[in-house]
Image: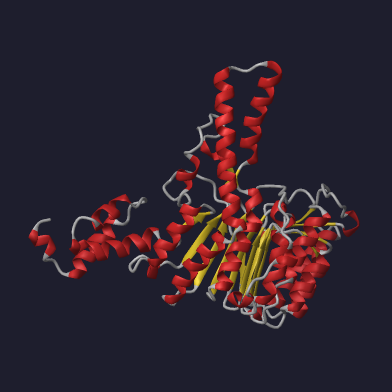
Amino acid sequence: MPPVLLSMPNEIIARICEYVAVHDHAKPISNLRLTCKTFYAPATKELAQKFLSEPRVMLTRYSLKTLVEICKHPLFGPQVRGVTFDPRRLNIAFFDQANSILERGSKYGVSNKAMTQARKEMSLYLKCFEQEQRLQQTGEASKLVTKAFTLLRQYGNAVKMTLSRKPIDHDGFDPIGYHKAVKKFPRHDHGGWDYVMEVMKGIPSTFLIMLEAAGRSESDISSLEISAYDFYYCDTYPDISKIHIQFEALTALTDIDLSLGQGALCCGLGKILEATLPFANSLQKVSFISDEDAEVQPSLEVLESAARVLGSVNSDELTHLELYSVSLRKADLLKVLGQHKKTLKQLILEDTPLVGSWVQLLSWIRDNLSLDKLVINLVSEFDEQEVSQDGYTKPTPWFRGGFDIRGATAMRPALDKFLAQKRKELAGDEDHGLGEYDLKYGEQPKIVE
């Protein structure tokens, strides 16, 4: 390293490190930190802030131990602000495929090479599956996460917890240890290594490990984000009665971001949320996004589960509620709004199918809430008599436009005007005036102040 570079002021060296760290992958800044002692500390700080502020881990011993080492590191650890947990587990379909080859071989004859390969894959799967189960069932996984959270607590860092089923895209931000885990297996043409693991069955159990570790470490969880959608079933149903969690960890939770599909709501994750959210008594913001098809009425089970999750929010400080594509019965939504009417200031309802009358709901909102912001956008309506156990009834588009009312003084006049316009439309009056709320593709709702 040229002496003139090493003699530069610390501010210049720090700026050089910032410049190198702008890349989308960690290798340049990681290499810089190893060039000399002068660059080690500032480059390490940039590496931690850019690439390790929220490590993404999965349920393997290597991944969780690496998380502990990151949190223990004197320069990496203080920069960690959250942990993202990937629920990926070994895919039983991988085992079934190998077993199918062996069964066909015994009945119809398969090449010796294919049979030998299938036996190797089955043996490897069983070995790795046993390790995966032991890691969870012995409590080792929970202990490792607890250790990581305890280290973060020593730095005074509140923790953001994320449970994400983000696809593997091989962009360098895959879960720590993912490639180490899957490269033990042969690559398959129909799915690469992605076929080795799947996310569905691990979602509830991963969330429980997160909660248990947060409680044992006495960490403060500042925010919780759960992304569990794009699947429609799950064969894992945790026994809530056996869960022993120190819920004090949730008392510092101020916002929660839920992206839950029908499968997540009905596979046990919904039940865990119902059991834990009542303890988040400082919750200020709830965002709930669903992947439901807004063109089809959801099943009764999904409606009830979504209502129970929202109803379990027991905070006296809730000011923001945002619902996107979440189907609800009017009575259930009114119950939630009534529970928080003294504190609620912002309400967003977008792509929301309502089982019941939107006119009645908006009239109630106008008369009972003191909002600073109300967004209604592209909503539909189901007749309460059409709700069935299985769903599949198409809703009636109720409002194809959108509005964004801002300011407490504008709320009642704006809603009075809109409801009068809507009643004209429902009565068959073509001169209703609702065209002022029409939206072109990509446009935001009309702001009313």
Outermost residue, left direction?
Answer: 3
Q: Quadrant of the C terminus?
A: bottom right
- Measured from the top left, where is residue 284 in percent x and y? 61, 76
Q: Is residue 251 above or below residue 307?
A: below
Residue 436 visible in the shown view: no
**Residue at 24% across, 62% down:** 40
Q: Residue at x 45, y 71 (%)?
A: 152
Residue 85 screen position, x and y as percent: 54, 58
Residue 25: x %, y % from top left: 36, 50
Q: How many marks?
A: 0
Compared across the picture, whether 218 is left or right of 281 comes to left
Query: In this view of the protein, which residue sits in the foreground, 337 or 434?
Result: 337
Say if residue 31 shows up in the picture. Answer: yes
**Residue nearest the viewer, comparing 240 with 337:** 240
Whole-percent x and y of residue 257? 60, 64
Q: Is residue 96 left or right of residue 123?
A: right
Q: Which image quadrant for residue 72?
A: bottom left
Residue nearest the viewer, comparing 290 with 165: 165
Quadrant location of residue 253? bottom right
147 on left or right of 439: left
Q: Quadrant of the N terminus?
A: bottom left
User: Which of the two residues, 412 or 22, is positioned nearer the viewer here?
Assistant: 22
- Taking the view exactly as shown, the residue that stands out farthest to the right is 385
Identify the colour scheme used. Answer: secondary structure
